[in-house]
Image (tube, rainbow, N blue to C red):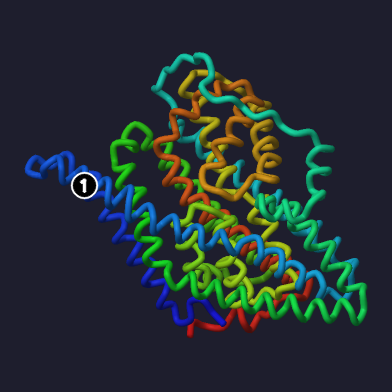
Amino acid sequence: MSIDSGGKLTRRVIVAMFAGMCAGIAINLMPDVPFVPRFLVDVVQRFLVDGLFDVVGSIFIKGLRMLVVPLVFVSLVCGTASLKDVSRLGNLGVKTLGLYLASTAVAISIALSLAMLAQPGVGFDLQAHEDDFAAPAAPSFSEVVIELFPDNPIASMAEGNMLQVIVFAILLGLAMSMAGEAGETVASGFAAFNKVLMRLIVMIIQLAPYGVFCLIAKVFAEQGFDAFAPLAAYFLVVACALILHLAVTYSVLLRTLAGLNPLVFFRKVKSLLVFAFSTSSSNATIPVTLETVEERLGVRNSVAAFTVPLGATINMDGTAIMQGVATVFISQAYGIEIGIAGYLTVVLSATLASIGTAGVPGVGLITLAMVLDQVGLPVEGIGLIIGVDRLLDMLRTAVNVSGDAVISCIVARSEGEFDVNVYEKGEL
């Protein structure tokens, strides 16, 4: 059961995305057109941008998020219960976590290098004032470990605490695999439920072109071009770093660690990238990521059910890239030199900050405050980049979910849980 058999849905979504861009830009330019009456501008803003676009786009996002917790929980329980050798779960976890953290460290290193070369913040000559943003206090290591375990798994599901949901699902799956006949009976029920959830995903995804059109149109109607002029250099550096990491780093990882053709990978994940770009949420894209990784790339559920939800929670390569470029940009804009030690601190802080970062729109700005605070830069500098962050957030999410898919393929290949025939199979 494939969400996008034959690529027809992908083409419809791409058309909807570009149509939304054109509609949004046209709406944004309406106030500057002399012969357009003011009342018409107000009507369009109220009933289209704040009305129809907002309602349809929000319903589409809610429909995807509605499936995240039950899909992750059920799929991960099924995957863990299917493991014949329980000891393999430890190897799986170590490989996945190590690759995610290493990938994030490479991402932010690329970002820092490009930003220091391009110097996007030179010429701003700003003075630091009292912070308008408060940097959140970083939790201790012991607090992070303790918070992994839920005291009420139902409350964790209701709150969308993905790390706690993942831990509970793994423990339940392990118990089922050890419970003999009773465990097999329960596992068959979860397997049937998982198929029903996948059918529900297909139902919601078929509405994607309409949701994507409204989401993109609203963003461009509100942003326009005015927000980008003073920050064009910053925007281009972040975008270039994201594209470089996506095209080069992931290609090298696929080729060297898994022996897979990167061109096949990118052809098969194009619909996933479109969904991630339009939703700006790694968590909301989990259903599409899981379906793509399993059905189109050949990763078996026993691995995908673990790597994809974990990646959506801790693998934030795109966010780390933004934080690296933003740190250099803000230090240059305020004329504050943080030195090599400061940049190494940024690499470490941003990498660790990615763990537990919620996969929701705009959360990168929150963790950026923590990173800036660590190197003594004014947190108020975040206000400089807010104007263009919404579009960059869309690009970051596409990179994040691509990383989840890449690491899933690498881990599955190393564990013997990868179907090369599915990966190499051409488009239907």
Q: Is residue 163 left or right of residue 391?
A: right
Residue count near mark 1 (Cα–Cα under 10 Å), binned few <14, some 14–19, many ≥20: few
Residue at 63% of width from left, 31% of height from top?
A: 371
Q: Position of residue 379 (x, y in %)?
A: 55, 24
Q: Is residue 384 above or below residue 403?
A: above
Quadrant for residue 207, please give it: bottom left
Q: Is residue 153 left or right of residue 32?
A: right
Q: Position of residue 255 (x, y in %)?
A: 63, 66
The front one of 38 and 205 is 38
Q: Is residue 6 left or right of residue 157?
A: left
Quadrant for residue 120, please give it: top left
Q: Is residue 61 above or below residue 124?
A: below
Quadrant for residue 93, please give it: bottom right
Q: Is residue 296 above or below residue 313?
A: below
Q: Secondary structure at mark 1?
A: helix
Q: Is residue 233 left or right of residue 115?
A: left
The front one of 94 and 216 is 216
The residue indicated by pointer 1 is: 43
Which quarter of the rendering shows the N terminus?
Answer: bottom right
Q: Is residue 135 above or below residue 177?
A: above
Q: Residue furthest left?
A: 35
Residue at 88% of width from left, 73% of height from top?
A: 177
Residue at 26% of width from left, 55% of height from top?
A: 22
Q: Position of residue 346 (x, y in %)?
A: 64, 33
The front one of 333 and 132 is 132
Q: Position of residue 409 (x, y in %)?
A: 67, 68
Q: Amino acid at mark 1?
A: Val
